[in-house]
Amino acid sequence: MINFESVAPVKLKGVGKGFWITLDPSQPEKILICEIDKLIRKLKHLAVNADLVLDVGDAKGHDALIEQIKIYLRENFELGHIGTSPVKRSVPLERIRQRDLSSGWNQHRSDVLMLRGRVRSGQAINAKKHLVITGDVNPGAELIAGGDVIVLGKLFGKVHAGYPDREDAIIFALGFNPSHVKIGSISALGSEGGGGSSSEFASVENNKIIIKDYMKASPFRRLPWPEAI
Amino acid sequence: MEGKIIVVTSGKGGVGKTTTTSAIGAALALEGNRVAIVDMDIGLRNLDVVMGLENRIVFNIVDVVQQKCKIEQAAIRDRRIENLFLIPASQSDNKDVLSTAGIERVAEDLRKQFDYIIMDSPAGIERGFENSIVGASEALVVCTPDVSAVRDADRVIGILYSRSLTPKLIVNRIEPGRVKRGEMLSHEDVMDVLAIELAGLVPMDDKVLISSNTGTPLVLQNDSKAGQAFKRIARRLNGEADLPFEAPTDRSSMWGKISRTFGLR
Ligand SMILES: Nc1ncnc2c1ncn2[C@@H]1O[C@H](COP(=O)(O)OP(=O)(O)O)[C@@H](O)[C@H]1O
Ligand SMILES: [Mg+2]
């Protein structure tokens, strides 16, 4: 018989007309595949056309691992549908969202530095976290922020977002024309005098700084819930 | 009534600070004000040459600050324009000997004796520049329509704001023909970046060099476009805040009209 209580990296139990495999995604891929292989082989003919769910619990970011396991299983067994466990609702997240909703997000304290007015040549602005400037940033000015940089105006000058090493930061401007862009540890030179009339943003993709049209590809549009930052 | 001290700055050298100082000082005196022009570009004095007064220097501003002489002894009366005085710079580079307290004391005395005190400042943002803004109550920033002058002017504007001075802008050496051909920034481009109140627009004008070489005041030349532009700036500073701006054009007929309107007074 199968031991349901084992502390092995992989556990299997029967559910309905299929099987549920719980696995510990922190284990090496090889070991996981080897253990799953053993368990399914023990099932012999019971495994044929059986549906299978691969469950990594609350862990996130293991899509590649799951994909590898799926490929292996399809190549070696004649299983039915191989799926993943439905995403579980997170209790703490629900609590936070309920609180935000009922109090109108008013209990947040923020490190965001928001300035209005023109930033001039020779001036340097340092923000611990996100930096929002409603105004223009002139050539020769310098902005450094621990998080995102948002300029509601023309952006010239030098900008470093995600200082020192956050590569998920972005730099946005209504008129995007900086001479120098750096996000985390990745930098790029701006195009001298080019463009600058459309609202664009810079972000890091595959270790490169990419500039995109904000209205077409805003990174925030994908966020389904207003998050306080 | 206490006089006003207006400092003329730019950041970059050679953009027209000295030209502006002498022209505006002369124009304000022609309007009936008692005016002192003070050369704070110590060690590189040249206002005396531009004004044609170099042969009459006895004392200079460093002597005044160091109390070696009185303001009245250092101030040279202009030959042609009544109520116009020059306090020259010293020839040797001794700006470091000027104390802030000393400059403030002299500034106070100057305000009692004159309606307007126009101070020429050195290029850069070093000690000499700092000295020239110590006593100022108003500031003018002179900028030419080129990228490096704009960058330096922007820096200076930031510093002036940090000293709670709100500067006004003069765009000098505008060449409408070159702007039209796209070879030069327009004054709108300059104003777009610097974004401070405009004091005036001054075109490129060969008469400027001739005037300073011969030591004759630019503002007395009615056929000088730049001279007329400086006169209009002086009128704005002197209370005619609503005097409209005339953008230089490359059609000389336009300028003909303007100089007829604002010519002889
Ligand atoms: N509007 C103008 N048109 C033509 N030449 C000018 C004009 N303004 C200044 N200049 C010339 O430019 C040079 C530099 O001017 P100056 O007033 O000495 O600048 P700064 O004091 O800022 O160094 C001088 O030779 C002057 O004659
Ligand atoms: Mg000069």
Image (cartoon, coloured by chain):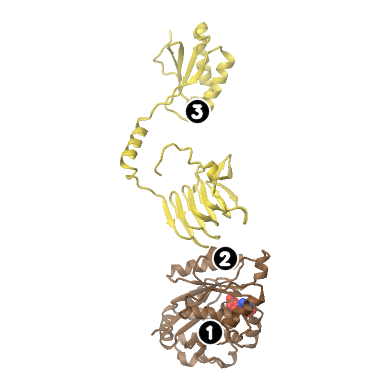
Give the Cα separation between the discs numbered 3 and 2: 56 Å
Q: Secondary structure at mark 1?
A: helix
Which chain hosts label 3? A
Give the Cα separation between the discs numbered 1 and 3: 78 Å
For image coordinates 34% across by 43% down, the residue present is A105
For image coordinates 54% across by 20% down, the residue present is A70
Which chain hosts label 2? B
Tell which of B39 and B59 is nearer to you.
Answer: B39
For image coordinates 46% across by 89% down, the residue present is B71
Q: Amino acid at mark 1?
A: Ala
- Where is residue A176 drawn, in percent x and y? 55, 52
Q: Amino acid at mark 3?
A: His
Q: Colour of chain A?
A: yellow
Point out the frontmost of discs 3 and 2.
Answer: 2
Q: Amino acid at mark 2?
A: Glu
Instruction: Identify the residue under disc 3.
Output: A62
Tell which of A187 and B175 is nearer to you.
Answer: B175
Same chain for mark 1 and mark 3? The answer is no
Instruction: Identify the residue under disc 2.
Output: B188
